[in-house]
């Protein structure tokens, strides 16, 4: 068992009052025995559990902590903002500053609306897409996860895939029927769906790099092909960059692949660990939003000044010249080391990287789709992960999640991880 006595006690108490003991299902460690570590502290690249055990953290709050835990500049910014008031529910300078920064960083974004979670961002972006096109149907990809809004829990990755329930009970069939799911990296299948439902598709939403079925990269030309299909069929292309935004590059993956979506959703890094998310895009589309237009969306905590202070501080640290290149080179060093260790033992391992995101599958062929990810050897993944945890490396407790890197990770953390991996591969 991974968890020590204190973690176990605390989790037992939580289970009495919280369904499954967790506030988000993937945290329950179901694939690793169902006894999660209860975390009490994070500093830089490391987290500490309730039993005082320390781990190099590659979950990093599922992505936001681009500079590690409790970075002093982020903490200071939060303290200063909190002293001036925790929230107003009124316009503040910080929200205009964040919006201007995002619109500068993403060439596809003329205007942006701030919200509090990735789920809110994707849900609202799709309502807006429907309002702007007057159409109802949405296309998504198998294994992509866009939050837990009713119509998006169809063939969903992340925690749903982890629990083997890519669809959810409680979603009316009529809602689910509005979402058409196609395999990731399959332009032909996508084109067929567009043809079959000609004139009825409002939007295609996609994680440009899929990060919720493990990390799966787009084939060359795939995203540009989707752009073309959307334009041809009068549908909006929505890039869900909640994970990839400001992680794969300054701005997001759209700057790497050079494809301009009509709408983009952001979250995670732009909140620095506090709840900030956003959706934005072309001015004429954004003009459909109330109070300018008839598409309604609102939130008491939207643009919260304390959360924005964390997000802005996080982004300022990443804005320094050469930041992404430096971090990506470190990630490459880590995955090259892992590949060498696996190769020497003849273990079939697929590794992938997108900037400061990385991932691995135990598989003897490249993983290009959700079907490939599901076919990977999850028993080996389990043995490997348990051994890594035992040696002080905290990985996502699911074979269908990405791993993250922060600027607080250095050579020492790479050495620690590779030493742990060497033992874990032997297992
Ligand atoms: N679905 C989220 C990661 N892809 C889970 C986040 C969480 O449990 O905090």
Image (spheres, helix red, strand yellow):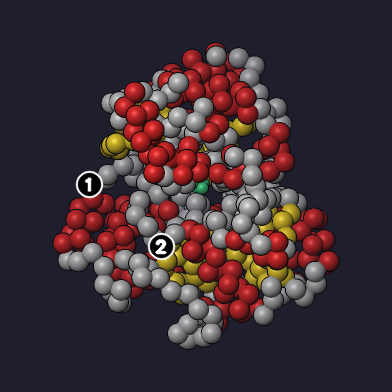
Pointer 2 local density, CA inside 10 Å: few below 14, some 14–19, many at least 20: many
SS assignment at label 2: loop
Residue at image mark 1 = 72
Residue at 56% x, 60% y: name it.
Answer: 149
Using residue 302 as the reference point, say whether residue 373 is left or right of it. right
SS assignment at label 1: helix
Residue 116 is tagged as 2
206 or 382, which lies in front?
Answer: 382
328 or 20, which lies in front?
Answer: 20
Q: Position of residue 391 (x, y in %)?
A: 41, 20
Q: Position of residue 266 (x, y in %)?
A: 47, 60
Residue at 82% x, 67% y: name it.
Answer: 195
Q: Position of residue 248 (x, y in %)?
A: 49, 49
Residue at 63% x, 29% y: name it.
Answer: 378
Check mark 2 vs ligand 1: CB closer than 8 Å? yes or no.
no
Farthest residue to the front: give it: 16
In this rendering, does residue 380 appear at all? Answer: yes
Residue at 43% x, 47% y: name it.
Answer: 23
Quadrant of the image for the N terminus? top left
Using residue 167 as the reference point, say whether residue 101 is left or right of it. left
In this rendering, does residue 353 appear at all? Answer: no
The correct choice, above or below, for 42 with respect to 141 in the image is: above
């Amino acid at each position: 068992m991974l968890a020590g006595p204190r973690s176990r006690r605390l989790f037992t108490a939580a289970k009495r009052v919280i369904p499954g003991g967790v506030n988000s299902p993937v945290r329950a460690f179901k694939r690793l025995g169902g006894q999660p570590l209860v975390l009490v502290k994070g500093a830089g690249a490391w987290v500490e559990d309730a039993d005082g055990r320390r781990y190099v953290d590659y979950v990093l709050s599922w992505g936001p902590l681009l500079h590690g835990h409790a970075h002093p500049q982020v903490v200071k910014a939060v303290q200063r903002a909190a002293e001036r008031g925790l929230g107003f529910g009124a316009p503040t300078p910080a929200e205009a500053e964040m919006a201007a920064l995002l619109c500068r960083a993403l060439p596809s974004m003329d205007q942006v609306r701030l919200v509090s979670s990735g789920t809110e961002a994707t849900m609202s972006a799709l309502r807006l897409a429907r309002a702007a096109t007057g159409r109802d149907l949405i296309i998504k990809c198998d294994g992509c996860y866009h939050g837990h809004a009713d119509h998006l829990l169809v063939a969903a990755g992340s925690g749903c895939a982890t629990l083997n329930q890519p669809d959810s009970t409680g979603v009316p069939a009529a809602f689910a029927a509005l979402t058409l799911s196609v395999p990731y990296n399959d332009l032909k299948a996508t084109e067929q769906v567009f043809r079959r439902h000609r004139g009825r598709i409002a939007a295609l939403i996609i994680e440009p790099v899929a990060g919720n079925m493990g990390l799966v990269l787009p084939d060359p030309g795939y995203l540009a092909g989707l752009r073309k299909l959307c334009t041809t069929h009068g549908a909006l292309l929505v890039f869900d960059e909640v994970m990839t935004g400001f992680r794969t590059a300054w701005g997001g993956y759209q700057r790497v692949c050079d494809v301009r979506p009509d709408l983009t959703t952001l979250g995670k890094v732009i909140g620095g660990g506090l709840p900030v998310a956003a959706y934005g895009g072309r001015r004429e589309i954004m003009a459909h939003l109330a109070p300018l237009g008839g598409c309604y969306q609102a939130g008491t905590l939207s643009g919260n000044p304390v959360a924005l202070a964390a997000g802005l501080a996080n982004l300022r640290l990443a804005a320094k010249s050469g930041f992404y290149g430096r971090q990506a080179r470190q990630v490459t060093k880590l995955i090259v080391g892992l590949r060498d260790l696996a190769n020497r033992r003849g273990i079939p391992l697929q590794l992938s990287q997108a900037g400061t995101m990385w991932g691995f599958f135990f598989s003897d062929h490249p993983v290009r789709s959700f079907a490939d990810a599901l076919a990977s050897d999850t028993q080996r993944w389990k043995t490997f992960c348990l051994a890594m945890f035992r040696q002080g490396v905290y990985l996502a407790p699911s074979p269908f999640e990405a791993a993250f890197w922060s600027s607080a990770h250095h050579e020492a953390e790479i050495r620690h991880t590779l030493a742990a991996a060497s033992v874990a591969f032997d297992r």
